[in-house]
Image: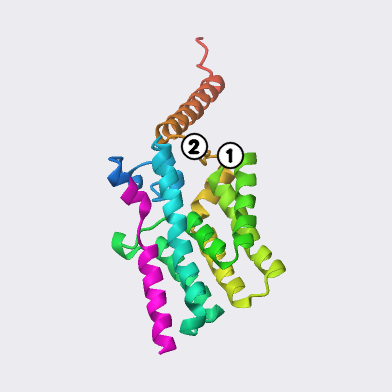
Amino acid sequence: MDLVYSYAAFLIAYLIGSLSFAVIVSRVMGLSDPRSYGSRNPGATNVLRSGNKTAAVATLLLDALKGYVPVALVQYYGFELGFEDTTIACVGVAAFLGHLFPVFFRFEGGKGVATAAGVLLAFEPLLGLATLVTWGATAALFRYSSLASVVAALFAPFFTLMFFDRPRVAMAVVVMSLLLLWRHWRNIVKLISGKESKLGEKAADSQHRRRRRIRRLHHDGASSASSTFHPPKEK
């Protein structure tokens, strides 16, 4: 019976994680689908590019809650239902996977930063807080949400292994961090090439900046070509 309860907990956590609040909040508030502009990622950072900060904050909080609530409930009722750290860790991963591959949205989900933060806060409040501080400090310093997410993902397993004696939870954190890094591989490429959008930059501003860069490169190329071309002299 304990095994049945565990599988039920995994399924419920996955279904809760599958609620794509970026899309839901945008629809409720009459905004464009976040999958149609900016990075096309259904997450709080991309919703912020719409210019509506209220929608972005609501998305952030709800995405974090859908990671926090399943894990918190399983931990709270775990003793009565016979759950151990293995089940708790798997519930956290299930909620995270729901955000990445939501069954209600054709398995096309976000990158999981806010949901992962909610899961970590439920695992260990100090672990979640340390990871959020790492994210916030990096974002404030460099103004790139993706870079902050990558740095936080790299540090989260270290925090878990160093300060908490919960091996199963540490393994779950490692799995989520690897998945989060994988989901950010395009952002990593853009960061290296200098094409990544900064935090809070509107979609229109980002596209305008990209067009200006293309025009500048085209102009520089044309100037270079004209400077190297010498017409033949008349005899």
In terms of secondary structure, where does tag 1 sit? loop
Verify CB contact (< 8 Å) between mark 2 and mark 1: yes
- The segment highlighted magenta reads 1-25
The residue closer to the viewer here, 86 or 33, is: 86
**In this rendering, position of residue 226 left or right of residue 129:** left
Kind of residue sitting beneath label 2? Gly
> Height in image: 111 above or below 173?
above
Direction bottom: furthest residue: 1
Question: Residue 41: image x %, image y %?
Answer: 40, 50
Q: Main secondary structure of the magenta part?
A: helix
The residue identified by callout 2 is 200
Q: Mark 1 points at which residue?
A: 143
Left or right of 175 in this view: 105: left
Left/right placement of residue 40 relative to residue 170 reads left
How far is disc 2 from disc 1 in space, using C-alphas? 8 Å
Q: Where is residue 222 in the image (x, y as percent from the top left)?
A: 49, 24
Task: Determine whether, in the image, residue 72 is placed left or right of residue 47.
Answer: right
Image quadrant containing the N terminus? bottom left
Amino acid at dot 1: Arg
Label 2 crowding class (10 Å Cα cut-off): few <14, some 14-19, many 20+?
some
